[in-house]
């Protein structure tokens, strides 16, 4: 192990891999500087207050913030991928991010960069755009003076990974599967546990510095075989699989989009990559960083156990778009003149703020939305048909929320237990929508629970959208608030009553100072 007490930088620290690598490095005794666009999102992680972690707000697309994050570090993990946050323009976004990293890493004098990319024939003319972009990022990173260790991984399986979620929902929901011909493509999946061990090992073995390695599990399987292994481990009947020649990547992505929580914009590049065989031809790293490699059955079994126990540490949905704080707190003038539309209700309860918080923290997912859950689902199905994310897979944990969590078609922006829950809508809407709950203590052991819907319309279409749904909101929101209050199990003293129905203008520049 390299004896260097300086921090190790982990970019993409709130993503699927980064969010699991940080606690593993901390447990191993490393000082870790975790980089993310939102400090509150980083603080919400179980490791956010670890004595060896340093939280850094920044973005690889922002050279200044990236430069500050790199200062004083001796190594960095590049675990950034823009496909979730920017599915249409991820190739160009990743290109710019990689170039920034090359220049900043050189200026900071880093000893090494460690990059996790994809596996597949680099010279294959049929290589998908997604895998080709992963190789381009590697080439850009390797063009600089800092040695780059490039780990080329096959499909990563683990609870919460996009690949695992696609596999899980397809097998669980479709006893008869009409599939594209890629169902017989060979692959060498690797468990997330093994990926993390290889990443950590790259800090501890100098011989991997500046080298490229292929990492995969101990067996090569077809996707057809992977479906059947999952069915066996999940206690399901053997799936009937019928491959047909007419399934294009576009049709495959729509099929995945409708059956699984993964939206078509993300499913398409993944589906295109399924036609490429991903098999390790170079196993040198197994001798350098030895470990027990889990086979597909073991990996799927462990992942299912994690799902059943609600111990999914990170999820592919964790990586979401960043939301400017100006919109959350004071409006955003480029949209419809800065007009914010708001509708709010309140209810007074004979309960403490801590008691009021409990049902709020359980909202969504399998727990439902207390009132009109069917209507929320219909809205999700409509969004799905329009190419949006739909109702997705509920929530990461049944009784715990943290900033950055996906919650049906919302994103958790802030959680202040006993005080505030702030959600951002991620469904397709002509503007930006927030759902906010505030808890205010009152004398005599009472509390006021406020529920506010805030909407920042984009143009005339956004304004028409808000007012066309206003009658439904005026039915849904007070009944939903009343159901939450009843779930507390304490007397309702007043309400729900209309608290605010207004149009807000953003503060002037003078007021904002």
Image (cartoon, helix red, strand yellow):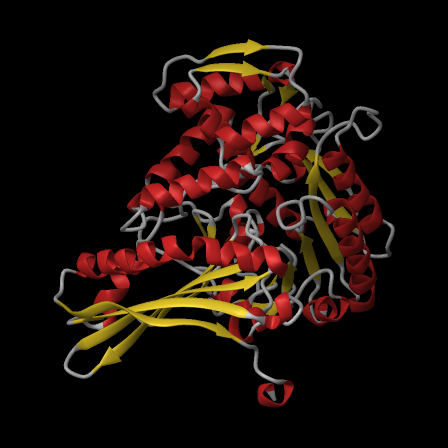
Query: In terms of depth relative to the viewer, which is nearer, 2 or 179?
Result: 179
Residue 122 placement (x, y as % from top left): 81, 31
Residue 270 placement (x, y as % from top left): 64, 32
On screen, residue 249 versus residue 422, left or right, reads: right
Identify the residue shown where x is 54% and y is 56%: 464
Query: In terms of depth relative to the viewer, which is nearer, 439 or 431?
Result: 431
On screen, residue 500 versus residue 261, left or right, reads: left
Q: Quadrant of residue 12?
A: bottom right
Identify the residue shown where x is 29% and y is 46%: 367
Q: Total marks drawn?
A: 0
Residue 211 placement (x, y as % from top left): 78, 43
Is 133 situated above or below 275? below
Does residue 100 appear in this view? yes
Is 230 situated above or below 112? above
Is 170 situated above or below 446? above
Query: In terms of depth relative to the viewer, which is nearer, 421 or 451?
Result: 451
Identify the residue shown where x is 52% and y is 47%: 317
Query: In terms of depth relative to the viewer, which is nearer, 155 or 363?
Result: 363
Q: What is the quadrant of the N terminus in the image?
A: bottom right
Q: Residue furthest left?
A: 491
Does residue 411 appear in this view? no
Is 472 situated above or below 391? below
Residue 166 placement (x, y as % from top left): 52, 31
Q: Quadrant of residue 22?
A: bottom right
On screen, residue 334 versus residue 375, left or right, reads: right
Q: What is the quadrant of the C terminus in the image?
A: bottom right
């Amino acid at each position: 192990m390299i004896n260097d007490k300086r921090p190790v930088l982990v970019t993409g620290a709130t993503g699927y891999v980064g969010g699991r690598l940080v606690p593993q490095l901390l447990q191993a005794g490393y000082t870790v500087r975790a980089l993310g666009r939102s400090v509150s999102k980083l603080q919400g992680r179980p490791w956010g207050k670890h004595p060896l972690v340093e939280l850094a707000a920044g973005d690889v697309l922002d050279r200044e913030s990236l430069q500050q994050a790199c200062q004083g570090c001796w190594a960095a993990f590049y675990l950034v991928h823009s496909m979730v946050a920017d599915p249409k323009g991820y190739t160009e976004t990743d290109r710019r991010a990689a170039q920034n990293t090359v220049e900043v890493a050189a200026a900071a004098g880093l000893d090494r960069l460690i990059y996790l990319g994809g596996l597949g024939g680099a010279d294959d003319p049929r290589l998908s755009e997604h895998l080709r972009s992963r190789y381009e990022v590697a080439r850009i990173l390797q063009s600089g003076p800092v040695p780059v260790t490039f780990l080329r991984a096959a499909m990563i399986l683990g609870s919460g990974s996009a690949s695992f979620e696609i596999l899980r929902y397809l097998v669980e929901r479709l006893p008869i599967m009409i599939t594209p011909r890629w169902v017989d493509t060979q692959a060498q999946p690797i468990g997330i546990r093994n990926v993390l061990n290889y990443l950590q090992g790259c800090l501890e073995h100098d011989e991997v510095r500046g080298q490229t390695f292929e990492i995969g599990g101990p067996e090569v399987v077809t996707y057809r075989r992977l479906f059947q292994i999952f069915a066996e481990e999940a206690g399901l009947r053997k799936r009937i699989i019928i491959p047909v020649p007419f399934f294009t990547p576009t049709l495959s992505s729509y099929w995945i989009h409708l059956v699984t929580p993964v939206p078509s914009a993300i499913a398409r590049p993944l589906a295109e990559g399924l036609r490429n065989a991903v098999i390790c031809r170079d196993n040198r790293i197994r001798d350098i960083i030895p470990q027990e490699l889990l086979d597909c059955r073991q990996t799927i079994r462990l992942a299912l156990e994690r799902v059943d126990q609600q111990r999914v540490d990170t999820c592919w949905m964790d990586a979401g778009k960043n939301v400017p704080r100006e919109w959350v707190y004071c409006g955003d003038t480029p949209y419809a003149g800065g007009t914010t539309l708001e509708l709010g209700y309140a209810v007074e309860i004979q309960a403490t703020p801590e008691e009021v918080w409990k049902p709020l923290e359980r909202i969504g997912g399998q727990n439902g939305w207390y009132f009109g859950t069917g209507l929320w689902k219909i809205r999700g199905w409509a969004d799905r048909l329009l190419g949006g994310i739909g109702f997705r897979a509920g929530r990461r944990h049944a009784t715990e929320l943290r900033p950055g969590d996906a919650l049906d078609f919302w994103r958790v922006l802030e959680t202040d237990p006993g005080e505030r829950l702030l959600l951002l809508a991620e469904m397709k809407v002509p503007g930006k929508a927030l759902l906010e709950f505030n808890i205010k203590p009152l004398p005599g052991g009472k509390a006021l629970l406020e529920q506010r819907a805030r909407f920042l319309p984009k143009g005339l279409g956004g304004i028409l959208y808000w007012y066309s749904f206003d009658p439904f909101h005026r039915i849904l929101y007070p009944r939903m608030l009343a159901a939450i209050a009843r779930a507390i199990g304490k007397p309702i003293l007043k309400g729900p009553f209309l608290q605010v129905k207004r149009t807000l203008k953003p503060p002037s520049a003078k007021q904002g100072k």
